[in-house]
Image (cartoon, rainbow, N blue to C red):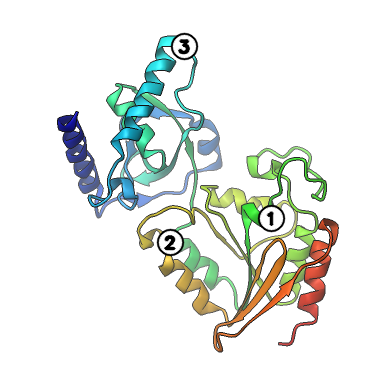
Amino acid sequence: MAGSNTQFEQFLQGEVEKYRGVAVPLRASLLERALVRRVNIKKLHPNPGDEFCMPEIGPHFGIISNYCEAIRNAQNYGTGEFFNEPLTVEKMSPDGYMILNGHHRWAACLRSGINKVTIEIVNTTHEADIRSMLQSTDNHRRVTLDLDEVVFRPQGDKAVEKRRLFALRPLERKPMRLGIPALFRFLSSKGYDVWVYTKNFYSLDDVEHCFESRHAGVTGVVTGTGRKTVKSLGTGDQAENLIADKYDMTIHIDNDMLLKTSRKTGEFEEFPLKGTAGDWSREIMDIIQGMKE
């Protein structure tokens, strides 16, 4: 097994080297993301910025072995798909797709001789996207929120926006906290840019559409903040520095706290949120309305 592990590591580094300096992310169309669900495994390429591909970290072969066993069980008992979730990928040039999430499952499929795999194509945030977002605004104050912890709510939560009819994209079907559209429109009217962050691999255009469909656009969207990848992908310290340098004031809104910070002075001020779920957005508006410039 050690020999095969070494052989795979050599193959992996060969794949990384083959696309080093030539791989470029491409924007996949909505139709392509909707229709392409299974691809030949040869069209999938490892992400050089992922720790899976870093020689000092590399693959966890125990995890790969466990996935290989899951594949064998699915084949033997005819249980259908090998894994609960598809591999998350991004379209890339010169060919195929770069893996964002699922390297160990990809490796297990390779070892098991699987020819086609199930994928989900997303358009993630890159540094070029962030630069474009920043150039689109003249504001120097921003508000930040976590998309999954604050904006979206768990199923069954009653203090949510009314669900839109004919919502086709998955994010449109997620329960949105009551008052978010009104809050975002209020912030925009007061000269604040709204930035939302998520550690998940949502498609950038899906996030933007989710708010635009409720007439509550956002200035910036940063996806995949949980991935451990090189900074050039636009979700690490370099990207955050680009954003932070733009704004003199940042207000971070959490479920039960509002934190105001000044870039120039380094001073901060906390505002606890005490209202009920239905009063959450109104309380934030009152706090911001009463703030000193």
Q: What residue type is labelled 1?
A: Val
- Which numbered disc, 2 or 1, marks the residue closer to the eye? 1
Q: Which of 31 and 89 is in front in this view?
A: 89
Q: Which amino acid does label 2 sit on?
A: Gly
Q: Distance between the residues labelled 1 and 3?
A: 40 Å
Q: How far apart are marks 2 and 1 (CA)?
A: 22 Å
Q: In which quarter of the image is the N terminus?
A: top left
Give how far across and how far down residue 60 sits, in percent: 31, 39
Above-or-below relation of 69 to 273: above
Q: Where residue 259 appears, x then y in whole percent?
A: 66, 74
Of the residues under marks 1 and 3, which one precedes in the sequence?
A: 3
Q: In which quarter of the image is the C terminus?
A: bottom right
Is residue 139 at all visible to an observer of this figure?
A: no
* Secondary structure state at the residue bearing disc 2: loop
Residue at 49% of width from left, 15% of height from top?
A: 79
Name the residue tied to disc 2.
234
Labels 2 and 1: the sequence-earlier one = 1
Q: Which amino acid does label 3 sit on?
A: Gly
- Tag 3 secondary structure: loop
Please state the horizontal and vertical placement of residue 145, each as a whole percent of the image: 64, 62
Distance in Å between CA atoms under marks 3 and 2: 41 Å
Answer with left or right where residue 50 lies relative to residue 163: left
Q: To which residue does mark 1 refer?
A: 151
